[in-house]
Amino acid sequence: MKIRQITAEETYPVRHAELRRGMPIESCKMDGDSRVGSIHLGGFVDDKLVAVSSYFFAPYVPYPGHKSLQLRGMAVLSDYQKKGYGALLLSFAEQWLMQRGVRLIWMNARTTAVPFYEKLGYEKQGSAFEITPHGPHYIMHKILM
């Protein structure tokens, strides 16, 4: 898989297929997509975009001294899931962001994705909570070293 920085708009087809299925394509736009400093990464297999992730500067209250980013909109097309592409994209992002001084990534993870993130060293914080209409989530984080 080849990974490179992409635009927010380029993430929409993958976000739509995996995170916003059945909703209007406009629902794929996230607050912060076009904010200065936002980062969008795409993973390509045979020149096809199959995995995306976006990162927004956002403080993480439990660790106020860390330069932190919030991960949002991480998705891998269903035909490419369970093949390691998501882990490759996230590992690449962690290294790339550490080189830019980021020390913590946090997210609101769907409960179905929690085992994936835990295998990669992310920790749950607190109890599950609902994000309507997307279902239950946990806050998760990882300190980058």
Image (spheres, rainbow, N blue to C red):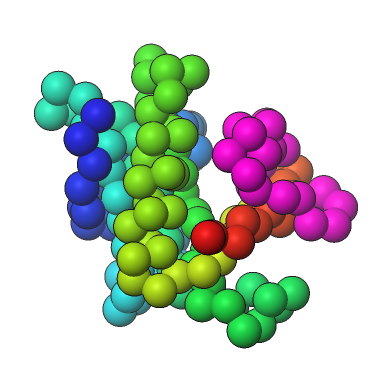
Specify start and end residues of the magenta stretch as a single range.
Answer: 109-134
- Residue 24: x, y in percent? 41, 43
Closer to the camera in the image, 54 or 96:
96
Please tell me whether residue 44 belongs to the stretch shown in magenta: no
- Residue 141: x, y in percent? 65, 57
Q: Is residue 133 visible?
A: no
Could you tell me which residue is drawn at 43 percent across and 33 percent down?
A: 86
Closer to the camera in the image, 26 or 82:
82
Say if 93 sits above or below 100 in the image: above
Could you tell me which residue is drawn at 51 percent across and 77 percent down?
A: 67
Residue 37 as seen in the image, left or right of residue 119: left
Classify residue 2 by image quadrant: top left
Could you tell me which residue is drawn at 30 percent across and 78 percent down?
A: 36
- Residue 101: x, y in percent? 40, 74
Tell which residue pokes out farthest to the right in this image: 127
Could you tell me which residue is drawn at 38 percent across and 62 percent down?
A: 97
Please tell me whether residue 124 belongs to the stretch shown in magenta: yes
